[in-house]
Amino acid sequence: MKTSLRFAALMLLVLPGAVMANEKLVQDKQCMGCHALKEDGAAPSFQKIAKFWKGKGNAEVAMVATIRKGSAATGGPHWNKATMPDQSERPLVSEAEARQIAKWILKQ
């Protein structure tokens, strides 16, 4: 019992840091220039994206491709006329970073 309580307490300390790290990554990669958490702007909100992809088995794979290569790489534009630029117009995003961002978005 003590071990599980310690683990739970540790997770309460670690998880907020992981969320903040993901938010910092999203900011560092300039995602927030077009996206916001709750409100649509130049691009759909992260909550809208999460809702769209909820329950779809290919969500993470498709999102990683779009995050790394832009809308054109995955048959975009996906949201009206807006297109996500490729990495020639924004900071480079590694495969691991894109996967981390996609997982964070899907939890919104």
Image (cartoon, rainbow, N blue to C red):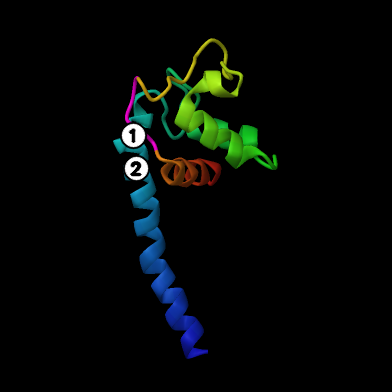
Q: Residue at x 44, y 46 (%)?
A: 96
Tell me the tag on residue 29: 1
Location of residue 75 (image quadrant): top right
Asked if residue 108 shows in the view, the reply is: no
Above-or-below relation of 108 to 39:
below
The chief SS type of the magenta part is loop
Residue 81 in the figure: left or right of residue 21: right
Q: Amino acid at mark 2?
A: Leu
Circle 2 packing at 10 Å, graded few (<14), some (14-19), many (20+), is: some
**Residue 79: x percent and y percent?**
57, 18
> What are the residue bounds of the magenta stretch?
89-93
Residue at 63% of width from left, 36% of height from top?
Answer: 53
* Horizontal relation, residue 34 to residue 61: left or right: left
* The residue positioned farthest toward the bottom in the image shown: 2
Q: Quadrant of residue 33?
A: top left
Residue highlighted by disc 2: 25
Q: Are marks 2 and 1 in contact (CB under 8 Å)?
A: yes
Q: Secondary structure at mark 1?
A: loop
Q: Is residue 65 magenta?
A: no
Position of residue 7 measured from the top left corner of the image (x, y, whole percent): 45, 78
Q: Is residue 17 visible?
A: yes
Residue 52 placement (x, y as % from top left): 63, 32
How far, Cα to Cα, is label 2 from label 1?
Answer: 6 Å
